[in-house]
C-alpha cells in the first residue's frame, strides 16, 4: 500500500474508531449506573457497523474537512434510559461526559508519546500519531460545547437552575440551528484552544 493511500485512509479509520470508542464509553457509563439499554441493543461493541450514522459518520467528516481542515464526525448515539440510572440527578451528566473523556484520554496518551518518543519514531509514524491526537482533541472539545445534541448540553441541563427552564426549552427547540452556528462559527473560534492543548501535549504546533 502506497504512503499516499495510507494517509488517505488512515484519517477515516482513526475518526471511525474514535467515535466508536466515544459512544462505547457512553454505553459503559450507563451500564455502570444501572441501565442496560445499550447492552441489550448490541451497542457495547467495537464493531463499527452498529455505530455508523450516514450524516455524522460520512457526510459531516467530508464537509468539515473540506471547509476548515478539521475532520469531525460522530457515530449513531448509544441509546440509554435516564430513568433507569441509579443516579437520577447527576447520572445523565456522568454518561454524557464519558465520551469526551475517552477522546481526551486518547489525545493525552498519544500526545505524550509524541513528546517523549518523537526522536525514536519515523516521520510517517510521528505524523500518524499526530493525526490521532488532533482528531480526538477535536471530538473532545466540540462535544463539550453546551448545546444540544452535543454531550456538553447535559452538563448545562444538570447544573442550570430551575428558573432558567425557558432557556432549556429554547435550546432544544432551536438545537439544529444552534448546531449549524456551532459548526461554522463557534468551533472555528476554538482553534487557538486546540492549538494550545496540542502544543502542551506534543511540544509541536498544530499547523
Image (tube, rainbow, N blue to C red):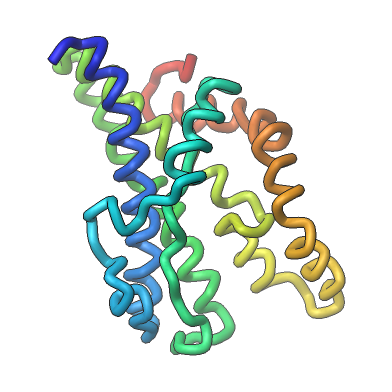
- Residue 125's image quarter? top left
**Residue 38 x/y as whole percent:** 35, 73
At 49% from the left edge and 61% from the top edge, which residue is drawn?
97
Compared with 69, 26 (above or below) is below
Q: Is residue 16 left or right of residue 120?
A: right
Q: In front: 41, or 160?
A: 41
Q: In front: 134, or 57?
A: 57
Instruction: Tell me the quarter of the image containing the N terminus.
Output: top left
At 65% from the left edge and 29% from the top edge, which residue is drawn?
188
Q: In front: 62, or 200?
A: 62
Compared with 95, 177 (above or below) is above
Residue at the limit of the structure toward the front, as seen here: 54
**Residue 191 x/y as whole percent:** 60, 27
At 28% from the left edge and 51% from the top edge, which residue is drawn?
48
- Residue 119's image quarter? top left
Compared with 188, 45 (above or below) is below
**Residue 180 x/y as whole percent:** 70, 42
**Residue 136 x/y as whole percent:** 41, 39
At 41% from the left edge and 46% from the top edge, which residue is drawn?
104
Compared with 2, 73 (above or below) is below
- Residue 108's image quarter? top left
Amino acid at each position: 500500500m502506497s504512503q499516499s493511500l495510507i494517509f488517505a485512509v488512515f484519517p477515516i479509520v482513526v475518526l471511525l474508531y474514535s467515535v466508536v470508542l466515544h459512544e462505547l464509553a457512553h454505553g459503559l457509563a450507563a451500564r455502570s449506573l444501572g441501565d442496560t439499554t445499550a447492552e441489550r441493543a448490541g451497542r457495547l461493541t467495537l464493531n463499527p457497523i452498529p455505530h455508523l450514522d450516514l450524516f455524522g459518520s460520512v457526510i459531516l467528516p467530508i464537509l468539515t474537512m473540506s471547509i476548515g481542515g478539521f475532520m469531525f464526525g460522530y457515530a449513531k448515539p448509544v441509546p440509554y434510559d435516564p430513568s433507569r440510572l441509579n443516579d437520577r440527578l447527576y447520572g445523565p451528566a456522568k454518561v454524557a461526559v464519558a465520551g469526551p473523556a475517552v477522546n481526551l484520554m486518547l489525545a493525552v496518551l498519544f500526545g505524550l508519546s509524541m513528546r517523549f518518543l518523537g526522536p525514536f519514531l519515523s516521520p510517517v509514524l510521528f505524523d500518524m500519531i499526530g493525526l490521532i491526537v488532533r482528531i480526538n482533541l477535536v471530538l473532545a472539545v466540540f462535544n463539550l460545547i453546551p448545546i444540544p445534541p452535543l454531550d456538553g448540553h447535559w452538563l448545562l441541563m444538570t447544573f442550570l437552575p430551575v428558573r432558567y427552564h425557558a432557556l432549556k426549552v429554547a435550546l432544544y427547540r432551536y438545537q439544529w440551528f444552534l448546531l449549524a452556528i456551532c459548526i461554522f462559527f463557534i468551533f472555528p473560534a476554538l482553534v487557538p484552544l486546540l492549538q494550545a492543548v496540542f502544543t502542551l501535549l506534543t511540544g509541536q504546533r498544530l499547523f
